[in-house]
Image: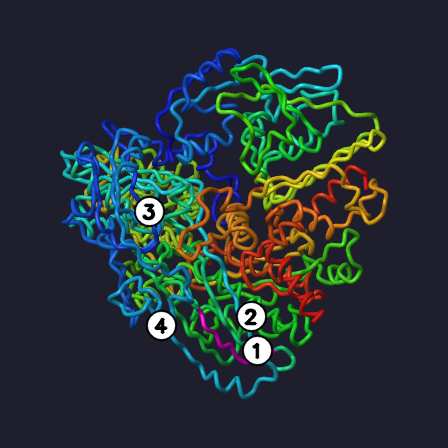
């Protein structure tokens, strides 16, 4: 369980990182290494080079913009847990971060690294899909933006080009009545989630997104979850129809068995309960 | 002076170095010229090895079985009638019989480079149908793991104590099928060894993370054809054993051969993937049991068929049938009933060879027996604790020979249960159950009991006839010139705290302060022969031997003191580290100084034996001590998700006289945490190709600190009548009862739903599926 021999580069700028990536088709980006490290040791990946992007200043910055916040791709889970991101989502991000694996993992693991890996059992994917986050991506032809919904193509599959780099995650500000909920079930503390439910609502603004993730199935996003409520009031979790939600997940193409579907429906309900303060 | 002898709650001496990172494990050892080893391991479970292709440029660094022609295979036979021996070549010869079996050894300056070599070795296989399931293995026409046997049964046993009589008399008859999953023992430190050849001494030295250095030495001697005197085995600090390191490893044999062949030290450190994929080797049992009882719940008999998945080979020294053969004798547990039949099968499969894990067969046996008791109680609508109280061996029967002739030495089993009932407050829990939980979860209470034979000796093991039969355990005690005490034992301490508890014994006998006592263990060059650390034996056996050696040392010191005090030996008493005579007193330090440094002060007729003694010890009866416990837990079950929370966990334990109650508490906590792993988390699934499906600890779940509740431990101390100080072996007990207690609690919670779980681990999915099946059954 030791990696193959590889070279190591630590670029100081995004441009230098992209150049190195372009010159080394067999290279892998190292953003925190909390997934890549074990994969290297298991020789599931055998890169010629690791490009360590954690020392690029722009990537570790958090910037409040007029309409939201931009979180550098190499901001660690731990710094988000410790309150590095303010001005959005009422502490939702801090709380999601605090539940990722163990503190030791959070100290090195990064938000951009997690999204680039797109493991449906990891926390940021589900949490940020509920927020309709956008990614800033750098590539040879400059910067582009992509909605996280479009970026994620499936379980462990993204629209990131081989010569591209996630630079930042943009999250829009919501109104004062916006509410957030996040619930996951893990077999044990710190393990990847069996099921994740994430929800964000701003009913005044007509915003309501509900996400089911966890395990090995690609996440499902409901952009109009009202249909999953028995009663019309979507602020009341008691009206959420777990059976209907499980069926809706299956209809959305989640190829999971009854147990996995119902677990996801239940965590969605618990996330809604949390958002509603119930 | 602060109490330091038997019964003192001393902080462990060894913790100082462990807590400061000053322990030395195999992985910390460096040798000049040392190279690392990695193994080519079989990716398939059952195949003929057609060819091994090694590129020419690395040929010199790769070893196959053809290179090691003089090395004998590992064989671990037993004398039990009908046992079929297996022959385990240390590198595969002809056939591979489980995933992870070693095919070639690759040597390089670093482990990473050794793994590069592994990747270049190409092995061609002719794949054979594997046997992945022990019940399938028993069927006619199943693929054969060892063709020459004609079937897949290492050993079949049958005992029948007039079972037909119980069938005639019983009012009720309850049948259940139980199973426990295959597990992978998971000490923090994996296995590992460094082998080196000393040209000056013409001696092989193997540092190995082992529980039994002397047995490893005997095994290496047999396989390599070396004299014992040419081999030294050292177990340095060892990061957990649990049975995983109670074995002669094929890796150790390969490394030893390589060190001699290449002329430089060779090291191998097992990694977690090897641990999980090549060595998931314990706990897998299957039972079909019918209990016969009268209407009041008094058991009349038990009729059982038990199968243990023993894997591909018989490991040295415990052999492949240790668990199944024990099942027959220990299934009746703490209960007294008149009729019994047990048919056991040690089945061979294409899985790693079985090793006994903390608790050995008892964890599976306790699971089957204690779930059976609850099933009988449900059938008769009785409180499960009442059924237990009706059937437990009573204190006035002690010492008690049970139906399988196990000799229970002492104890009050019903009292342990009553204390557990009080501590868990059964009445309050029943009221709470009736009321229901505000969050909709279901509450259940579960109990489990066991007794644990420990430190059993010659008479027991001679009957099994395995390669290792414990005799008199020996210890060496030596006074140093400055009045300190050195104790040498052949067993090994790796979490048991023997460096502390044996010092306490030394203090108890000689009055030498425990910080002036040094315990040396785990090195065949320095210590007397011992079968090592297993079977919860060390406090009884090494403790008894140390006490005996210290007794004899006290006599020697009295003799010398008598010369110095010019009185008769009989007039000298030794107390609190001082020799008291009619005309004065001497400290042990003064006696030692004169013996070693000023012999001119002693007359010529002084006893020349000196101040060093090796003494042997056996308890008055060597059939073992029987510690026991009652575990009780309250579980909350969410039937929609299958989540289980343990709200309370009580352990009432009787380990005889406790030498250090704090260390015993630690042993119980650690064992019970492992028991929770068995109950709720740990399971190595093998698919139909006998491929292990977990290769990292994110797939093979171990309980962590947040999954383990704050156990409430209560001690009873019934002395063993047969051992020094009345101690009993107690190290394994914590791991035995939790799967049974927790599953009984879950089943108690689900009673209203009509669901009953009979397989460990009880996973959330299994709970939800059992509830769904029960509801479907109720609706139909």
Residue holding disc 4: B140
In front: mark 1 or mark 4? 4
In the picture provided, is A165 more to the left or to the right than B308? right
SS majority, magenta: strand
At a point 64% along the width and 63% down the height, the residue shown is B747
Q: Which structural element holds mark 1?
A: strand
User: Disc 2 versus disc 3: distance between alpha carbons?
Assistant: 35 Å
Q: Answer whether residue B535 is visible to the viewer in this image.
A: yes
Q: For the N terminus of chain A, give its image quadrant.
A: top left
Front position in the image: B723 or A28: A28
Instruction: Answer few, some or many: residues within 10 Å of disc 2's Cα (few below 14, many 20 plus, some between 14 and 19).
Output: some
**Which numbered disc flags the more N-terminal residue, 4 or 2?**
4
User: Disc 3 versus disc 1: distance between alpha carbons?
Assistant: 45 Å
Residue holding disc 3: B489
In front: mark 4 or mark 2? 4
Q: What stretch of residues is rendered in magenta?
A: B298-306
Q: Is the same chain shared between marks 2 and 1?
A: yes
**Which numbered disc flags the more N-terminal residue, 3 or 1?**
1
At a point 85% along the width and 30% down the height, the residue shown is A204
Instruction: Answer few, some or many: residues within 10 Å of disc 4's Cα (few below 14, many 20 plus, some between 14 and 19).
Output: few
Residue holding disc 2: B395
Instruction: Answer few, some or many: residues within 10 Å of disc 1's Cα (few below 14, many 20 plus, some between 14 and 19).
Output: many
User: Disc 3 versus disc 4: distance between alpha carbons?
Assistant: 49 Å
Q: Which structural element holds mark 4?
A: loop
């Amino acid at each position: 369980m030791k990696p193959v021999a590889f070279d190591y580069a630590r670029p100081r700028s995004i441009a230098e990182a992209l150049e190195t990536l372009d010159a080394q088709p067999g290279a892998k980006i190292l953003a925190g290494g909390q997934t890549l490290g074990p994969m290297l040791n298991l020789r599931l990946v055998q890169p010629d080079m690791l490009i360590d992007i954690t020392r690029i200043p722009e990537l570790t910055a958090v910037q409040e913009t007029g309409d939201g916040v931009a979180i550098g791709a190499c901001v660690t889970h731990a710094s988000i847990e410790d309150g590095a991101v303010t001005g959005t989502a009422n502490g939702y991000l801090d709380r999601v971060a605090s539940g990722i694996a163990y503190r030791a993992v959070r100290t090195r693991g990064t938000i951009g690294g997690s999204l680039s890996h797109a493991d449906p059992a990891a926390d940021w994917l589900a949490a940020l899909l509920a927020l309709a986050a956008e990614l800033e991506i750098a590539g040879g032809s400059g910067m582009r933006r992509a909605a996280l919904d479009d970026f994620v193509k499936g379980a462990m599959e993204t629209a990131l080009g081989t010569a591209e780099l996630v630079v930042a995650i943009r999250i829009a500000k919501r109104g004062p009545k916006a509410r957030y909920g996040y619930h996951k079930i893990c077999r044990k503390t710190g393990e990847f989630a069996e099921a994740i439910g994430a929800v964000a609502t701003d009913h005044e603004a007509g915003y309501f997104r509900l996400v089911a993730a966890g395990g090995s199935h690609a996440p499902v996003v409901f952009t109009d979850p009202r249909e999953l409520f028995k009663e019309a009031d979507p602020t009341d979790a008691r009206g959420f129809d777990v059976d209907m939600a499980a069926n809706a997940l299956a209809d959305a193409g989640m190829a999971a068995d009854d147990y996995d579907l119902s677990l996801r429906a239940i965590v969605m309900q618990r996330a809604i309960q949390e958002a509603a303060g119930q | 002076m602060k109490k330091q002898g038997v019964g003192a709650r001393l902080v462990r001496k060894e913790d100082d170095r462990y807590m400061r990172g000053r322990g030395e494990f195999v992985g910390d050892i460096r040798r000049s010229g040392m190279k690392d080893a990695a193994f080519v391991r079989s990716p398939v479970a059952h195949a003929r090895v057609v060819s091994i292709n090694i590129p020419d440029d690395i040929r010199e660094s790769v070893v196959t079985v053809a290179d090691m022609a003089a090395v004998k295979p590992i064989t671990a036979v037993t004398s039990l009638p009908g046992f079929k021996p297996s022959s385990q070549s240390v590198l595969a010869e002809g056939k591979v019989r489980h995933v992870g079996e070693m095919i070639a050894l690759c040597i390089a300056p670093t482990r990473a480079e050794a793994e590069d070599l592994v990747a270049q070795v190409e092995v061609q296989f002719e794949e054979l149908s594997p046997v992945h399931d022990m019940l399938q293995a028993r069927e006619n026409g199943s693929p054969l793991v060892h063709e020459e046997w004609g079937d897949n049964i290492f050993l079949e046993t049958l005992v029948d104590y007039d079972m037909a009589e119980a069938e005639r008399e019983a009012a009720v008859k309850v049948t259940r099928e139980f199973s426990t999953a295959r597990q992978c023992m998971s000490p923090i430190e994996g296995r590992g060894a460094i082998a080196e050849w000393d040209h000056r001494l013409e001696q092989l030295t193997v540092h190995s993370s082992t529980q039994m250095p002397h047995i490893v030495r005997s095994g290496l001697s047999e396989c390599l054809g070396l004299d014992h005197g040419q081999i030294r085995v050292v177990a340095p600090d060892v990061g957990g054993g649990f049975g995983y390191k109670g074995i002669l490893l094929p890796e150790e044999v390969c490394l030893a051969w390589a060190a001699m062949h290449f002329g430089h030290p060779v090291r191998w450190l097992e990694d977690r993937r090897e641990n999980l994929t090549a060595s998931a080797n314990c706990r897998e049992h299957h039972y079909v049991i019918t209990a016969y009882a009268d209407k009041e719940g008094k058991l009349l008999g038990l009729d059982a068929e038990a199968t243990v998945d023993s894997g591909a080979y018989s490991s040295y020294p415990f052999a492949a049938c240790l668990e199944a053969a024990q099942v027959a004798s220990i299934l009746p547990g703490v209960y007294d009933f008149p009729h019994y039949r047990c048919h056991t099968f040690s089945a061979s499969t294409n899985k790693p060879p079985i090793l006994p894990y903390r608790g050995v067969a008892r964890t599976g046996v306790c699971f089957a027996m204690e779930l059976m008791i609850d099933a009988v109680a449900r059938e008769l609508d009785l409180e499960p604790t009442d059924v237990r109280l009706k059937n437990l061996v009573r204190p006035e029967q002690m010492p008690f020979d049970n139906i399988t002739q196990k000799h229970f030495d002492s104890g009050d089993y019903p009292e342990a249960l009553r204390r557990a009932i009080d501590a868990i407050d059964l009445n309050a829990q029943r009221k709470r159950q009736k009321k229901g939980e505000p969050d909709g979860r279901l509450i259940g209470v579960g109990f489990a009991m066991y007794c644990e034979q420990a430190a059993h000796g010659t008479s027991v093991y001679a009957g099994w006839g395995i390669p290792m039969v414990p005799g008199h355990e020996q210890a060496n005690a030596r006074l140093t010139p400055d009045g300190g005490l050195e104790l040498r034992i052949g067993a090994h301490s790796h979490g048991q705290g023997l460096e502390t508890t044996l010092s306490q014994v030394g203090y108890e006998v000689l009055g030498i302060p425990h910080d002036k006592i040094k315990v040396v263990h785990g090195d065949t060059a320095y210590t007397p022969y011992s079968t090592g650390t297993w079977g919860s034996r060390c406090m009884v056996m090494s403790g008894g031997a140390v006490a005996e050696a210290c007794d004899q040392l006290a006599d020697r010191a009295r003799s010398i003191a008598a010369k110095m005090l010019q009185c008769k030996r009989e007039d000298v008493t030794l107390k609190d580290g001082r020799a008291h005579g009619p005309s004065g007193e001497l400290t042990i330090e003064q006696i030692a100084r004169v013996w070693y440094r000023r012999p001119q002060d002693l007359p010529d007729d002084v006893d020349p034996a000196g101040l060093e003694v090796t003494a042997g010890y056996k308890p008055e009866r060597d059939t073992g001590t029987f510690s026991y416990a009652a575990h009780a837990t309250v579980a909350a079950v969410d039937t929609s998700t299958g989540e289980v929370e343990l709200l309370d966990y009580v352990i009432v334990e009787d380990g005889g006289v406790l030498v250090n109650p704090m260390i015993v508490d630690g042993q119980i906590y650690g064992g019970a945490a492992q028991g929770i792993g068995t109950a709720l988390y740990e399971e190595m699934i093998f698919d139909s190709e006998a491929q292990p499906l977990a290769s990292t600890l994110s797939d093979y779940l171990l309980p962590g600190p947040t999954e383990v509740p704050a156990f409430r431990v209560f001690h009873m101390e019934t002395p063993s009548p047969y051992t020094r100080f009345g101690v009993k072996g107690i190290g394994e007990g914590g791991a035995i009862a939790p799967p049974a207690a927790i599953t009984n609690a879950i089943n108690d919670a689900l009673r209203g739903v009509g669901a009953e779980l009979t397989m460990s681990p009880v996973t959330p999915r299994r709970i939800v599926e059992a509830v769904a099946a029960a509801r479907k059954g109720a609706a139909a």
